[in-house]
Image (cartoon, rainbow, N blue to C red):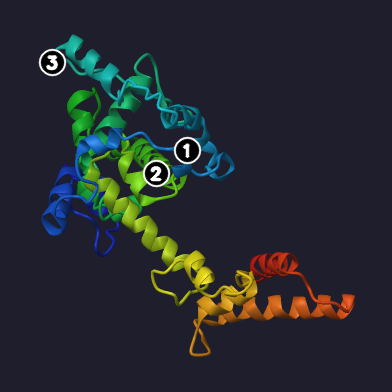
Amino acid sequence: MMNSTEHAAVRKGSVLFTRIESITSYTGQRGQPRSGTQEQSDTPVSANDMCALDEWPSHARRYRAQLQDEADGQKKKGRGVLKGFKAAKKHFANGSAKLNITFSEKLGGTVGINYRSFKDDVVFIMKKRLPLIGVRTWSNIHPSIHRLIVSDIIDKWDLEDTPETEEKVLKIAKERYRGWRSTLSSTYKAYKTDAARLANLLEDLQLEEWEWMIDQKNSDNRKKQKTKHRVGSKSYSQLSFEKRNLETGEEPDCIALWELTHTKNGTWSNTESHNVYDKARQEVQNKETETQCPVSSEKRNNIFQTAYKDTL
């Protein structure tokens, strides 16, 4: 029969791969993931690898206690990913007969004794079918891949293959897919380094998928940077040390270091970087005029931090 996905608007470049196909394609193009073997995901993460609790997204903080235990060497074994387990058990007990599910006439959601099992089954099939690699949002996935979820559900549940059924199934799948990616994003933010992220693979991910998502997050973060430094791979700490006063050992303050790291041959890397410097310098001059005495390095650093936040 004609289904609603055939009429759905298809974005240019929509991903036509299933999840397994996307992993295979990625591996073929990039080779084995740099994270190495599956065993590396069992490497305990140290407390220094985790961000402070207040930097974690609110919906991810509940996992912090468990991760802290792991950081202290108390690795806990969870039950793993059990989505769809209860539904599978019911399907097995029911033999070849399909399970019943009812949708609320008023609100449209699932109701009845199987309402939770149905949702878990949709999530299980969604994670089995939908790709993560090459995808940023639900709409990036080709409708024909969405349709696979509906077909799998109709094979197991006593539902008519209608546009209304498809809409209800995909509504659940879309909400849970977005929630899944949100959880992955939170996990990325929870660690300070890629090494820590790669060593702590979530149970429902493949190494290739996690590597791709980390690379995409890093790329997005670089694009969001409004200021650009010009020191290559050399750290600020190393440059500051190299520019220290050899007699006193005093290193440049934040304002001087900012100029050193964001200019080359007297040219600023971009307007935003120059604006931060100008604002900080102006505030220092104003303070020195007001007090009629030089501003200490500590106060200059504080002025710079304020100027940086206010400007960007």
Q: Residues within 10 Å of mark 2 (few under 14, many from 20)?
A: some
Image coordinates of residue 139 in percent, x first then y, are 33, 53
Q: Kindly give the residue lying farthest to the left in the view shown.
A: 28
Instruction: Measure the C-alpha gap from mark 3 to mark 1.
Output: 50 Å
> What amino acid is labelled 3 in the image?
Ser
**N-terminal label among 2 and 1:** 1
Quadrant in the picture for residue 223? bottom left
Q: Position of residue 35 (x, y in %)?
A: 24, 47
Which mark, residue 178? Answer: 2
Residue at the image point whose x is 23% and y is 14% from the top: 89
Look at mark 1 in the image and give the residue it sits on: 47
Query: Under tag 3, what secondary structure?
Result: loop
- Residue at 13% across, 15% down: 96
Pointer 3: what residue?
Answer: 96
- With respect to residue 240, does 209 lie above or below? above
Q: Nearer the viewer, mark 2 or mark 1?
A: 1
Which residue corresponds to the image point at 25% horizontal and 58% vertical from the top-left? 14
SS at badge 1: helix
Using the image, tell me which numbered label, if any, was put on residue 305.
Answer: none
Q: CA distance from mark 2 to mark 1?
A: 29 Å
- Residue occupying the far right of the picture: 291
Q: Report the residue at 57% width, 73% height from top.
A: 244
Question: Label 1 sits on what residue type?
Answer: Ala
The reply to whether dot 3 and dot 1 touch (C-beta < 8 Å) is: no
| Left or right of 28 in this view: 132 | right
Q: Mark 2 or mark 3, which is nearer the start of the sequence?
A: 3
Q: In this image, 53 relative to 233: left or right? A: right
